[in-house]
Each structure stands twice: as structure tokens, then as C-alpha cells.
Amino acid sequence: GGVGGAGQAHALGAAVVSEFQRLRTIFDTHDGLQMLVGHHIEPLVFNVMRAMQPHQVAPGEVLTRQGGEADSLYIVDEGHFDVTVRLGGFGPERKVCEYGPGIVFGERAMLCREARAASVVAASSGRVWVLGRERFAA
């Protein structure tokens, strides 16, 4: 019993380390995230990464709605997400691009309180990391 439990704990620990390594690579290479935390060096980067919450998404789940309040930053870990806009805020939504693993969006929410510029909807099941403004400020 004990050996299997230790092996499971080790595997879980390795998975968490792997996730943190993927997140750290994105933090180290994304200009917007560097503007937010780059000058605070290691402790802040680690604290921000720890404050991020994993969120499983289902196809069709809306992460952001154009014109809505911008209060969270997202990092795509798995899956694909359609990005749509309504020109002038009216008319049919038009797909402008697709986000996939490693993409960061919503970082402006950490800097100012602007309305969302686009809608982001899950095109597949997936997983994102979420950092809300309140957790970032804490």
C-alpha cells in the first residue's frame, strides 16, 4: 500500500512540476507577461504562477464576451479556442483567429479596466490557466 501511494504522489508532483515548467516558459517568452512581472524577478513570477487556477473547458464554453468586463488573464494549456468579433459591436460575429496551447490573452485586464475586444469560445474541450485581477493584486 505505502509504496504505491508514494509512487502516485511522486507522479503527481512530477505533473505539477511539468505544468509549472510550461507556464514558466510562457512567462519568460511573452512580452505582455514580461511587462507585468518581468521587473519583479523570481518571487513575483512564482507567486503569480501559483495564483493561477486551472480550468477545464467544454466545447462551446464562452471564456470572454466582446464588450464584457475584462477581469482575468488566460493561458491556453490544451485545446483550441475561436476568437470572434462583431464589427462596431453589432451584426454577426466573425471569426478572426484561433488560439491554441501557449497563447496568452486578456493581459490588458491586469493593466486597465477596458471592455473585452473580442469573444473567445472553446472550439474543443481543453484547459486554461486563469488569473483574476483580484488574485493578481493580492
Image: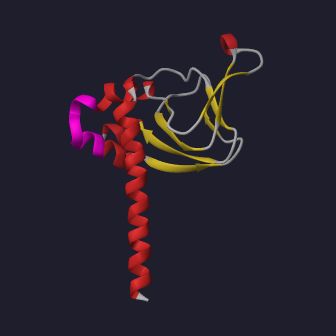
Dominant secondary structure (helix, strand or loop) of the stretch shown in magenta = helix
Q: Is residue 28 left or right of residue 124?
A: left
- Residue at 49% x, 29% y is 106
19 relative to 134, above or below: below
44 relative to 36, above or below: below
Front residue of 9 and 36: 9
In the image, residue 45 lies in the stretch drawn in magenta: yes
Q: Is residue 90 left or right of residue 115?
A: right
58 relative to 108, above or below: below
Q: Position of residue 138 (x, y in %)?
A: 30, 42
Q: How is the image coloured?
A: secondary structure
Displayed quadrant of residue 43: top left
- Residue at 39% x, 25% y is 32
64 relative to 95, above or below: below
Q: Which residues are magenta?
A: 38-46
- Residue at 29% x, 32% y is 37
Q: Position of residue 45 (x, y in %)?
A: 29, 40
- Residue at 61% x, 23% y is 118
Displayed quadrant of residue 33: top left
Q: Residue furthest bottom?
A: 1
Quadrant the N terminus occupies: bottom left
